[in-house]
Amino acid sequence: MDKSEYSPLFETKKGRGRLLYRLFATSIFVAICFIWLYRFNHIITQEEDGRKWVWLGLLASELWFGFYWILTQALRWNTVFRQPFKDRLSQRYEHMLPAVDIFVCTANPEIEPPIMVINTVLSVMAYDYPTEKLSVYLSDDGGSEITFYALLEASEFAKHWVPFCKKFKVEPRSPAAYFNTIIDSSSHFQSDTDFDNELVAIKKLYTEMESRIENATKLKRVSKEVRLKHRGFSQWDSYSSRRDHDTILQILLHKKDPNNSKDVDGFILPTLVYLAREKRPQYHHNFKAGAMNSLLRVSSIISNGKVILNVDCDMYSNNSESIRDALCFFMDEAKGHEIAFVQSPQNFENVTKNDLYGSALLVISELEFHGADGFGGPLYVGTGCFHKRESLCEMKFNDDYRHNWKSEDDLFKEANLQEIEEKSKGLASCSYEENTQWGKEMGLKYGCPVEDVITGLSIQSKGWKSVYYNPPRKAFLGVASTSLLEVLIQHKRWSEGDFQILFSKYSPAWYAFGKISFGLQMGYCSYCLWPANCLPILYYSIFPSLYLLKGIPLFPKVSSPWFIPFAYVIIGETICSLLEFLFCGGTFKGWWNNLRIWLYKRTTSYLYAFSDTILKLFGFSNSVFIITSKVSEEEVSKRHEKEIMEFGTSSPMFTILATLALLNLWCFLNVLKDVILRGGGFGAYEKMGLQVILCGFLVLINVPLYQGLFLRKDSGKLPNSLAMKSTILALGLVLSFSYV
Ligand SMILES: *[C@@H]1O[C@H](CO)[C@@H](O)[C@H](O)[C@H]1NC(C)=O
Ligand SMILES: *[C@@H]1O[C@H](CO)[C@@H](O)[C@H](O)[C@H]1NC(C)=O
Ligand SMILES: *[C@@H]1O[C@H](CO)[C@@H](O)[C@H](O)[C@H]1NC(C)=O
């Protein structure tokens, strides 16, 4: 037997510097204990009643910060990094690679333009993988004729695009992204004339297709001639609205229809299916989880791939070898059988160098998920994730079970395409799931805005492991939000969903207890508890500054020994977070921007998420899944490129931010006034050193907000009415506090 048969298909390396980090974290913990001790001890000595309350608030905040800090250590304690070996996979398994089904989900043609959707579809159709084993399903919850039309166009274009990609090994394989890179680097064009000619030809094909699709998108309808050309459009005859229609299902490319399904070189193309599941007003559609479950059933009789990849429609594949990477984990002889899913990070292409809105989620994807992986596996985040079909559909982990990767023969050998289509349609009907385990034990779970996370958690609770694979060349790239409000709303939605999990049946705190490792449980809780950070942070952004104004110290004075633990935690954690950020590939300015967004999320997104969840627990209001707009205007993207913060509209979230910023500005100016008028430098503030620093920090980090309030003139500034309102609010707060 060949020796290589025994070499693993992937290896796992421990993160470097773990020992050093653990020592550091332990020392911080000791310092935190001293801070708690200080607070406890000194509350008792507070004479005045009013002051006791403030101190209790500070104690509560500091207890929370310490507790939360401990939770986040789980994601740093035990980082691991994975390395697959694709060449070994090819050597051993090239001829028995499993069938792979790819699900692309879209929901709204206005927010997610069809041209973007089909670029994602084309990028995954062109994976470096045997095409007869690849099937791509587009789930269109918008039920849009335009999206169907775009997919139809894409199925024709794929006949040129897929062979072109394979012949010249182009990367990335989303046509739009690829042509963008060509424009960028037109100077070092390959001089290969064959390539040049084909490139010009295919680019022309693409531009023509793009303009046809964009025209149809603009007109919001498909022309009569086009409709007559394909029988698929007749399915819209009975369509009344996107919330009320029959199942629309069309197999556009399939090996049973070889005349239509070969590329220009005569090779068979991947299977391509359009699905808009049935929608009726009286049935809840369960958002993306509902769509995914319909896809799971439909695909099981069309292609039944053993491995399932799901991506959001705005996340194109940037790496044609990702499937092979993932298979290295699943097919490894020693450990593959315990792995249920392989999660890739969410990466974004529209992130500016210093990541103004922290949308790259750098520390989460470059560090924290590696930490979760060390404790049994990352969370499932709903996109860019490879699943084993069986673990997604119910199966419990069993150590003796070995997967059979050999493809079964077609389930419906005799049936023709129409018959398969008819059969599949039934599986996507509204009533199919009634009285079944779908949404409960099978498939994705229902009843929670972040269904992905509980689905992943429940898989892990059944004994499976997951793997986080974060390659240097990123596997999937999406579009990040380019305005502050979008970012804040998106985080409100995420954090609210995560927070609700905590109180749900699938709470990582008790449901998973004893089923997953304690470290991973802590990791889950640190995400689920995001919203709870809002209260202590708000407290810390308001009261120390107000008491500074009054001249009342709340922290130990600089010369006291109790000052040391405070200083150690502040300086230590600041430097640590900076180093972490730089290690993750960020810049210094990016770190500062990230810190600002960190603060803004806590004082707005999390506050909203927190109060909404609490209200919901008491039975008020229902959750609505808000989709953030990803289409940006010209001017907005120009400002985005220059890294100027985008406000533009009035929003209660901005009022909160501006009020807090102005309140701190007022307090800080007051300190400066004192220092200048009284002379003697900051000496008088020795007793309140930490309060001055905290207030100064809050002013410094809010500089872009002051600019947006008072200095900028462009359309991305904060509206004047909001500036007025927040000034009045801030002054009102200061004055009422001073005189009451
Ligand atoms: C799209 O519309 C523009 C004008 O609105 C027209 O000039 C162009 O020819 C149209 N393209 C196609 C492919 O129909
Ligand atoms: C994203 O970036 C690309 C180029 O990097 C640009 O062409 C596109 O307009 C940007 N999209 C948005 C929504 O900002
Ligand atoms: C995407 O792929 C291209 C090569 O096709 C690579 O140059 C680029 O770095 C990748 N992007 C990311 C974010 O990894």
Image (cartoon, rainbow, N blue to C red):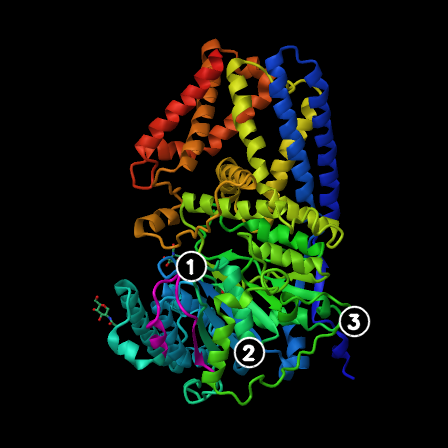
Q: Which residues are magenta?
A: 232-254
Q: Residues within 10 Å of mark 1 (few under 14, many from 20)?
A: few
* Residue occupied by mark 3: 400
Amino acid carrying mark 2 in the image: Ile
- From the viewer's side, name the closer residue of 187 and 33: 33
* Residue occupied by mark 2: 301
Q: Which badge, 1 or 3, is on the more N-terminal residue? A: 1
> Nearer the viewer's eye, disc 1 or disc 3?
1
* Residue occupied by mark 1: 281
Q: Is residue 244 magenta?
A: yes
- From the viewer's side, name the closer residue of 683 and 467: 467
> Nearer the viewer's eye, disc 2 or disc 3?
2
- Identify the residue shown where x is 66% and y is 71%: 328
Asked where in the image residue 693 lies, by quadrant, the reply is top right
Residue 625 relative to residue 562: left or right: left
- From the viewer's side, name the closer residue of 439 and 183: 439
Specify the quarter for ligand 1: bottom left
**Dot 1: element:** loop
Residue 369 relative to residue 232: left or right: right
Q: CA distance from mark 1 to mark 3?
A: 45 Å
- Identify the residue shown where x is 35% and y is 46%: 639
Q: Which badge, 2 or 3, is on the more N-terminal residue? A: 2
123 up-or-down from 252: above or below = above
Asked where in the image residue 145 lies, by quadrant, the reply is bottom left
Give the image location of residue 259, x and y in percent.
42, 89
The answer to whether residue 320 is visible is no
